[in-house]
Image (cartoon, rainbow, N blue to C red):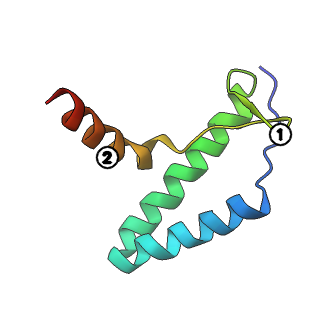
Amino acid sequence: MKCREVFLSVDANADFKAGREFYDLNSKKAGDYFVAGILSDLESLSFYAGIHPLFSGFFACLPVAFLLPSIMKFMKSRFG
């Protein structure tokens, strides 16, 4: 398996820092969990790049762990 380099855009880096600060306001452990989840997603992207959609010439993925509550809320509102 070929490992690829992962680059964060300036905007993504700013979002990463803002996310950490946001979750740290709730709890230090929440901030740590956020960072661990994002780093896991980035590591996954480096190994599995090529199966993700291309955006501006780069493979990209959304952080699944932090979308899950929104997805669950949507599913509940849509399907009861």
Q: CA distance from mark 2 to mark 1?
A: 28 Å
Name the residue rendered at 33%, 75% in the picture.
26
Q: Nearer the viewer, mark 2 or mark 1?
A: 1
- Pick the quarter of the image with the C terminus: top left
Pick whichever of labels 2 and 1 is earlier in the sequence. Answer: 1
User: Which labelled disc corresponds to residue 68?
Assistant: none
Front one among 73 and 66: 73
Residue found at the far front of this picture:
78
Residue found at the far left of this picture:
80
**Residue 30 to residue 1: above or below:** below
Left or right, 57 with reference to 47: right
Name the residue rendered at 34%, 46% in the picture.
70
Circle 2 SS class: helix
Name the residue rendered at 37%, 68% in the picture.
29
Tell whether label 1 touches label 2 (CB within 8 Å): no
**Residue 35 to residue 65: above or below:** below
Left or right, 55 with reference to 69: right
Residue 76: x and y in percent read 20, 35
Q: Amino acid at mark 1?
A: Ser
Q: Which residue is mark 1?
A: 56
Q: Which quadrant of the structure image shows residue 45?
A: top right
**Residue 37 to residue 77: above or below:** below
Q: Which quadrant of the structure image shows residue 46?
A: top right
Q: Amino acid at mark 2?
A: Pro
Circle 1 SS class: loop
Q: Which residue is mark 2?
A: 69
Residue 65: x and y in percent read 43, 44
Instruction: Say few, some or many: other residues with alpha carbon within 10 Å of mark 1 (under 14 / 14 to 19 / 20 or more).
Output: few
Front one among 46 and 74: 74
Residue 15: x and y in percent read 61, 64
**Residue 61 to residue 33: above or below:** above
Residue 27: x and y in percent read 34, 74
